[in-house]
Amino acid sequence: MTKSALQIARASYKAKMPKALNGNVTIKEGAPTQSVADHDEIKHLFPNTYGMPIIEFVENTEKKDYPAINVGVILSGGQAPGGHNVIAGLFDGLKKMNCNSRLYGFLLGPAGLVDHEYMELTGEIIDEYRNTGGFDIIGSGRTKLEKKDQFDKGLEILKKLNISALVIIGGDDSNTNACVLAEYYKRKNTGVQVIGCPKTIDGDLKNEMIETSFGFDTACKVYSELIGNIERDCNSARKYWHFIKLMGRSASHIALECALQTQPNICLISEEIEEKGQTLNDIVSYIADIIAKRAEKGMNFGTVLISEGLVEFIPAMKSLIAELNDFLAANGDEFALIKKSEQIKYLIGKLSPKNSAVYASLPENVARQLAMDRDPHGNVQVSLIETDKLLIEMVGRRLEQMKNDRTYVGKFNAQGHFFGYEGRCAAPSNYDADYCYSLGFAASILIGEGKTGYMASVRNTTKPAEEWIAGGIPITMMMNMERRHGEMKPVIQKALVKLDGAPFKTFAAKRECWAMTTDFVYPGPIQYFGPTEVCDQPTKTLILEQNGEI
Amino acid sequence: MTKSALQIARASYKAKMPKALNGNVTIKEGAPTQSVADHDEIKHLFPNTYGMPIIEFVENTEKKDYPAINVGVILSGGQAPGGHNVIAGLFDGLKKMNCNSRLYGFLLGPAGLVDHEYMELTGEIIDEYRNTGGFDIIGSGRTKLEKKDQFDKGLEILKKLNISALVIIGGDDSNTNACVLAEYYKRKNTGVQVIGCPKTIDGDLKNEMIETSFGFDTACKVYSELIGNIERDCNSARKYWHFIKLMGRSASHIALECALQTQPNICLISEEIEEKGQTLNDIVSYIADIIAKRAEKGMNFGTVLISEGLVEFIPAMKSLIAELNDFLAANGDEFALIKKSEQIKYLIGKLSPKNSAVYASLPENVARQLAMDRDPHGNVQVSLIETDKLLIEMVGRRLEQMKNDRTYVGKFNAQGHFFGYEGRCAAPSNYDADYCYSLGFAASILIGEGKTGYMASVRNTTKPAEEWIAGGIPITMMMNMERRHGEMKPVIQKALVKLDGAPFKTFAAKRECWAMTTDFVYPGPIQYFGPTEVCDQPTKTLILEQNGEI
């Protein structure tokens, strides 16, 4: 591996940890817990891991003896900054308890467990990856650990390697599955513990006890760096509207955090659009109206942030997509015979009047995309829709009309951007480096203490690291029953943007002002070596959620 | 202006300068100079500013007295990191010579001079913009200062404000025009000096005396940060080929520098493609071949860098575009009557056989773009072609064929990216902050010494700043005659990537290895506060050009 100068300098960074984790640790158990809803069903499904107490780690005066154990670790799902530090923290924690303990990494995600692909993670390897981005130390993958035969296949290799605990680093689904696995291994008396770690850059795995998922901090800072650079360009050239789509399909936390950091003229929060039942037309009107008002003041430029999942949150679009999916599933053969150039007309004639009207209003390339590009299950691939370009085209058309009506005098030139892959594997910020290392270290203690079905937790992170509170949260505590693929399943509740939460309310209170005044903020790149107010700040979302104000 | 924490911390950074500029300065003049070619024509066009000596600033034992003067400054063309520091250096230099001197900024580019839009730049304003990105202090614009009536209009306001020197910060064209203006004002005995400063993030304004244009360093570092992040993602997920288009229409310096920094699997250098007379087909074969070879080793992922101007450097595409422009100019009315869905077929029937075949081989959306999206002069808008997507589509098709021929076994999933606006207004790196400040300061001394038709120059910049050499270069020295819009014009030679230069040769020697080994390098974000090997390095291009090796 050829290393950059920054990578070399950064390798020696010592991640900060909660005070309780630095010395000898013992656990403090709280009262029994309940799931967030559907208590009886969840309890019934998880008889061995339901109702366990919240655990907090506290300093201990004496050193405990822990036996040597072998542990496995899996990176599950999309990359997020800090994954390597979770593994480093886990490794250091295990070695501190007993220097003869060993850590194995399963390769390319959960599939590595099922297919018995693994490597031992030695101190030498771990040192190569401290404070770096990416999941490349063992790779990641999207295989879902859901079925009994997968669990049994996994158990074979765990037994063979004498592994008595497995750490699964992943998002809400992966942690749900970690808990199902914990329950299964416990029920079968396998002696294998399973611990989860909260990861998603989307920020949608969080709740009262899990303040944030790791990677969100770094990814938002990278995107905000780029948005700030574009805003400064926008404000210098004064001739473009920049439409910037941001990763986050099911929740708009990233768009909201980036808006709080960079103060754009417009930011569309999907959860608000759904709540208000807005149409694409409403959204286009909202944007065009601000553009026209700025044009009146001679400002033919601005910045618009858009959450990736927007289209799926617009009720009318959701309904259109659902009907398209059903129609094409039932009439695929007939549709395949229609000439390409006639397909859109054909569909307009077949859809129900309401959906037909919505479909007819879409720009040609989007209508075409909805008709033709379907995934292996025959579903429309909403993620392929270039929402930035869709809005640019529709807003452009609207402004043309407004020009004819003399309600708009200005020039509209626009540029589209999408930021996703740019931030998923960035080297972790100090916050994520510290948070992840502490999470991994906490996971090692949960293992040492014989726990299973827990998620590692580090709280109070808007304070200096030594005041952070580490422990473990029973995963069943975060669950409820939801319909997935037509079946009721126990799942961890996804955290969407709360419209009555401080982050959204702060944004909502300021957006009218930001729309008209061009009060862009330029956060610049993540810094690792400078003053603490530059290098060690958590996200504005977290500060607002914890403290109510920035 | 709401400021980010980094902006506040960075405001107090003291830009480093060449030793000679820190104390009292005097000038050392070299021998008379000649233009790079076409001596007689250039001399004839610039009788008053031709042949002047190269100037070097040296330390002086005594302090000179300079009269108070008023100076104007213009930002011309696209944004580049460091423009604000040029202005800060100019301001500080002028004030150091005489604290009663004043600086005026003309607004939104050269148009501000012609239209008499300006503001005085006070110390308070300058302090707000030190070490920041963007050109928003006075804005920029693309009006070309070329005509006598523009010069005369400009002179009116210069006289009114009692301005005796004008600094034009711009690229090759803007500096050519600065020299034309210098000659004009000198010939007319207006007493107004004109000084240029070398800016372009593309890096194509450089020569023996101008080592680099400002902004190139920062922009390449921002793009390399993002490329590195994507590479790390690529190497973690192991399932995507990322095609990344990089700003730089006429020269591939940015793509080459980013390749040297990040070691991608493939990088396409336009100058090489033109030199070798490659076709689009050749390029597709080259990429598909590497993808197939990596697939054989189970590596269905990789990273491809593409220079923005690629399409215009492919001789066959250049010829096609030229014929399309001519044909559509002559037959626009007839073409307008053709049904949209028939346009491509129509053009295939009309073009000459060779160009027709090339046109027919293009993906539909690109063929459509070439036929329909024309600029106000009726020319095809090559910059709108999404080269990343064009190549993804063509490579994908080729790989399908190869699959049928059993010469490829693998999965090809690709993602396209384009980085341009993301880097143009980034806050300057230490290098650009220092270089720009020194350039501005040097401009002030050229003014103080009564010079005109010079470009500020700072050389030896791979050494520590105190060893840098500052001075001025006669702009005519960089000129030759070139055909522009059908007329022979005196212009500064554009610096393209030299295929026999050390940067390209270093890349060429390593690319085969990089193609197969996945030796990605992750440079990470620009750092301002860390160790010097992280914060103060110039580009690899510059180090190679100066020292022959990295």
Image: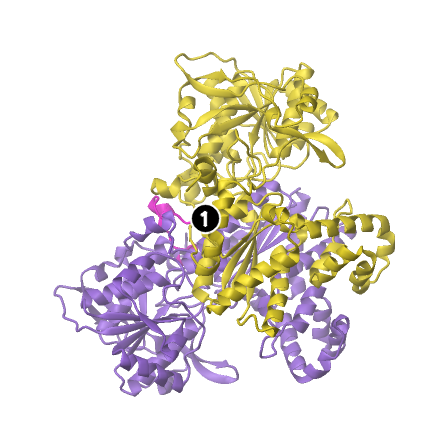
Chain colours: A purple, B yellow
Question: Which chain does the residue under circle 1 lie in?
Answer: B
Q: Where, quadrant-wise, is the N terminus of chain A in this rendering?
A: bottom left
> Where is B249 relative to A70, above or below?
above
Q: Position of residue A93 (x, y in %)?
A: 24, 65
Q: Residue at horizontal 75%, vertical 59%?
A: B357
Is residue A282 in view?
Answer: yes
Is A113 in front, or is B311?
Answer: B311
* Residues drawn in magenta: A526-542
Q: Is residue A257 part of the magenta span, yes or no?
A: no
**Image-quadrant location for residue A394:** bottom right
Q: Residue at horizontal 72%, vertical 79%?
A: A335
Q: Mark 1 points at which residue?
A: B261
**Image-quadrant location for residue A378:** bottom right
Q: In this view, does A263 lie to the left or right of B277?
A: left
Mark 1: few/some/many CA within 10 Å (<14, 14-19, 20+): many
Q: Residue at horizontal 57%, vertical 35%?
A: B205
Query: Callout 1, which amino acid?
Result: Gln
Q: Residue lying farthest left?
A: A62
Q: Position of residue A194 (x, y in %)?
A: 31, 76
Is B399 in front, or is A395?
Answer: B399
